[in-house]
Amino acid sequence: MKILKEKILKDGKVIANGDIIKVDSFIDHQVDVKLIDLVADDIIGHIKKTESYRKINKIITVETSGIVLGTLMSLKMDVPLVYARKKIPITLIEPLYSRKILSPTKKNEIEIVISSKYLSSRDSVYIVDDFLATGATSEALIEIIRNSGANLIGIGSIIENSFLNGRKLLLGKYPDLDIYASVRIKKMDINGNIEFY
């Protein structure tokens, strides 16, 4: 996606020894909604090429960075958005599906949960997130989805940091999984150099 690549080169900043791209001016803190709307169209365009598009009845993400993309996709596809919570409020009283993950940006372990009220064997779901990096978050969501009995259609992200091998990890465990990213970064370095696929 050319417009997203240009935005990353213009406003993104490579940090943390060259393995994290800071995009908080247009994705993670301040949101360029028009740009994310185009990303939503791009991912939906990809999914429509598959036979499974019409089966999707829920979009799944993790709070908070995937919520904007997930909201736009759910609106365009006319299906609900369900997001995994990182903190369990007292209002979640029904049984929960949960997994612990190590946050790549916060460097601490967090638990993500989805209520059994909103995910079941009747669902066919598509996972979306801002990034695919190490694959830890996607793997945890896949385990939650499998435990619920729901059918996973695929995974879409705004940006994939391919050099962190998340795709390789997920395809090693789930070889038939459809993984898509609007932009795939092949490599980057601390000097700010970014190479795309």
Image (cartoon, rainbow, N blue to C red):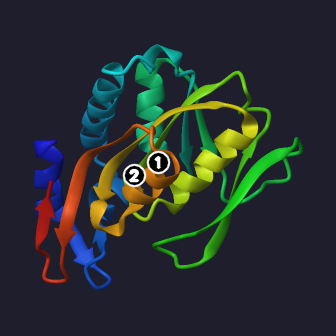
Q: Residue 66: where, in percent of width, then height?
A: 47, 48
Q: Is residue 90 left or right of residue 56?
A: right
In the picture of the structure, the residue carrying the numbered disc 1 is 66
- Name the disc covering residue 86, or none: none
Do the residues bearing badges 1 and 2 touch, measured as CB atoms within 8 Å?
A: yes
Query: Mark 2 falls on what kind of element?
Result: strand
131, 87: nearer the viewer: 131
Establish if 88 lies above or below 20. Answer: above
110, 33: nearer the viewer: 110
Q: Residue at x 43, y 19 (%)?
A: 53
Q: Residue 110: where, in percent of width, then height?
A: 65, 68
Residue at the extreme top of the image, as rendered: 54
Which quadrant of the figure has residue 121? top right
Q: Residue at x 88, y 41 (%)?
A: 94
Establish if 24 lies above or below 26. Answer: below
In the picture of the structure, the residue carrying the numbered disc 2 is 130
Q: Amino acid at mark 1?
A: Gly
Report how far apart the C-alphas of labels 1 and 2 lie in the structure: 5 Å
Q: How many marks?
A: 2
Q: Residue 183: where, in percent of width, then height?
A: 23, 49
Residue 64 visible in the snapshot: no
Q: Residue 100: where, in percent of width, then height?
A: 68, 64
Establish if 124 lies above or below 70. Answer: above
Q: Quadrant of the N terminus?
A: top left
